[in-house]
Structures are given as structure tokens and as C-alpha cells.
Amino acid sequence: MMTKKEVAQAYINELEQGHVANVVALFSANGIVESPLYGLQNASDFYVQLNNDTHNSKLSLKGIFEDHNTGHMALYFEYIWTLRSDEKVTFDVVDILEFDTNNKITKLKIIYDTVISRRLLESLEAE
């Protein structure tokens, strides 16, 4: 079984590569994602939708923080997101990860400023 830190590092690597199945495999069967742009969804639906809207992703991990009382982790990273329209936006992200007893992600909450990315995503949806 992977440690929580190994799961967190794998998450960043697989997300950057756009390996949807590998990202989803890090989640429990009922794992969910709460995103400021896409809302609350099961992990599989969220990552398929994100992948469909994405041309390229570049993630630079700035830190992994663990709350030893709850076992939750926070990932702090820079995300350079190139949408399928080739529009690019760069922002800092904090992902809060909650785990089950098998170190599978049960919930991932994404926190970032959506001012620019929301406008770009809305222009994609208008196409």
C-alpha cells in the first residue's frame, strides 16, 4: 500500500501527464472532487471532463502538508493550464485530500482563484 505522501506525489505526476485512469485509481470507489469551476462530482467524471477541456498541464509542486490529527493532506502547487482552445492560465492551487484507511482519496477539494480560468472555460463552453 502506498503512503499518503506517495499517493500525493503520484497524484501530481499523473495529473500533469493527463493519465485519467491512473489519477482515478488513487481514489476510493466513491471518491469525490469539489472544484470551484466544475462543482462537486465523482472523481471519474471530474477528471474525464477536465481532461476533455485540457490541451496541456504543467504542475510545479511547492509543498505537501499533513495534518497528523486528521490525516488530511494539502498539496500546494503552481498549475499552468493550457485549455483545448490553446488559451493558457497560470495560478496557484491548494488541494485538500482526505483519505480512507487504505490511503485512497475519498475527497479532494480544490482551492484557487478562478477569475481568469472561469472566463476561459466559459469561452470553451460557448464554442
Image (cartoon, rainbow, N blue to C red):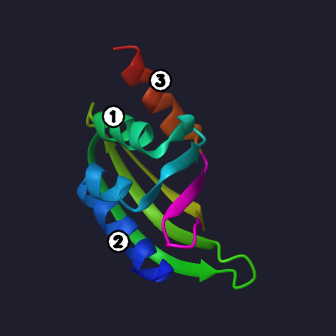
Q: Position of residue 66 (x, y in %)?
A: 63, 81
Q: Residue at x 29, y 62 (%)?
A: 14
Q: CA distance from mark 2 to mark 3?
A: 30 Å
Judge whether 13 appears above or below 29 on screen.
below
Q: Secondary structure at mark 1?
A: helix
| Residue 109 within the segment the image draws in magenta | yes
Q: Residue at x 38, y 67 (%)?
A: 12
Judge depth for marks 3 and 1 and give the one in front.
1
User: How many badges with numbers are in the image?
Assistant: 3
Q: Decide: few, some or many residues near mark 2? Use Cα within 10 Å; few <14, some 14-19, many ≥20.
A: some
Q: Amino acid at mark 1?
A: Asp
Q: Position of residue 4 (x, y in %)?
A: 50, 78
Q: Is residue 93 visible?
A: no
Q: Quadrant of the C terminus?
A: top left
Judge depth for marks 2 and 3 and give the one in front.
2
Q: Which mark is residue 10?
A: 2
Q: Which residue is mark 1?
A: 53
Q: CA distance from mark 3 to mark 1?
A: 11 Å
Instruction: Report the span colored magenta.
Output: 99-113
Q: Are marks 2 and 3 in contact (CB under 8 Å)?
A: no
Q: Earlier in the sequence, mark 1 or mark 2?
A: 2
Q: Amino acid at mark 2?
A: Ala
Q: Decide: few, some or many residues near mark 1? Use Cα within 10 Å; few <14, some 14-19, many ≥20.
A: some
Q: Residue at x 75, y 82 (%)?
A: 69
Q: CA distance from mark 1 to mark 2?
A: 22 Å
Q: Which residue is mark 3?
A: 122
Q: Secondary structure at mark 2?
A: helix
Q: Amino acid at mark 3?
A: Glu
Q: Which mark is residue 8?
A: none
